[in-house]
Image (cartoon, rainbow, N blue to C red):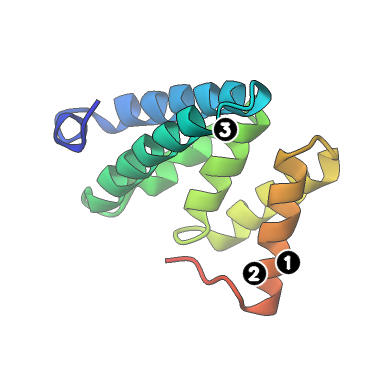
Amino acid sequence: MTAAQYTKMSVSELVQEFEALCIAQYHSTEREEISEYNKRYKRIVAVQNELKSRDGDQRRALQTLFGQGNLQVRYMAAHVNLAVDYDKARQELEAIAATKWYPQAAEAGMTLENLDSGFYRPR
């Protein structure tokens, strides 16, 4: 799907697309398919950008994925939400890090460290 196609989708459809892409990205990680992971990442960013461009910045809609069964989905949704609802997103990252389910727990932990040190500032 292209960025132009995302403009025609509802917020709910974009959330579903984000979730599906993150699940596919998780499977790419498990199979060590780096190029597939990267392709999906680019599409995830396109969905994120489309949500951001909507009236009122609709990235908050991804909070419905907090607590979802797949940690990749949860991590990506939390990361996107750092810019719009820092406290809720941080709580989700802390919960992911506490699972010790790698690599997502490690990514969440590193994100928290980078936030605390000021190295990373969400936009």
Do tag 2 and tag 3 residues touch (Cβ < 8 Å)?
no
- Separation of disc 2 and disc 3 at Cα? 20 Å
Classify mark 2: helix, strand or loop: helix
- On the image, numbered disc 2 is attached to which residue? 115
- Separation of disc 1 and disc 2 at Cα? 5 Å
Quarter that holds the C terminus: bottom left
Dot 3: within a 10 Å radius of its alpha carbon, few (fewer than 14), some, or many (20 or more) residues?
many
Classify mark 3: helix, strand or loop: helix
Q: At label 2, which amino acid type do we have?
A: Leu
Q: At label 3, which amino acid type do we have?
A: Val
Q: Residue at x 30, y 44 (%)?
A: 51
- On the image, numbered disc 1 is attached to which residue? 113
Q: Residue 20 at what x, y percent from top left?
A: 45, 22
Q: Residue at x 64, y 21 (%)?
A: 31
Q: At label 1, which amino acid type do we have?
A: Glu
Do tag 3 and tag 1 residues touch (Cβ < 8 Å)?
no
- On the image, numbered disc 3 is attached to which residue? 73
Q: Residue 40 at what x, y percent from top left?
A: 42, 32
Q: Residue at x 70, y 40 (%)?
A: 104
Dot 2: within a 10 Å radius of its alpha carbon, few (fewer than 14), some, or many (20 or more) residues?
some
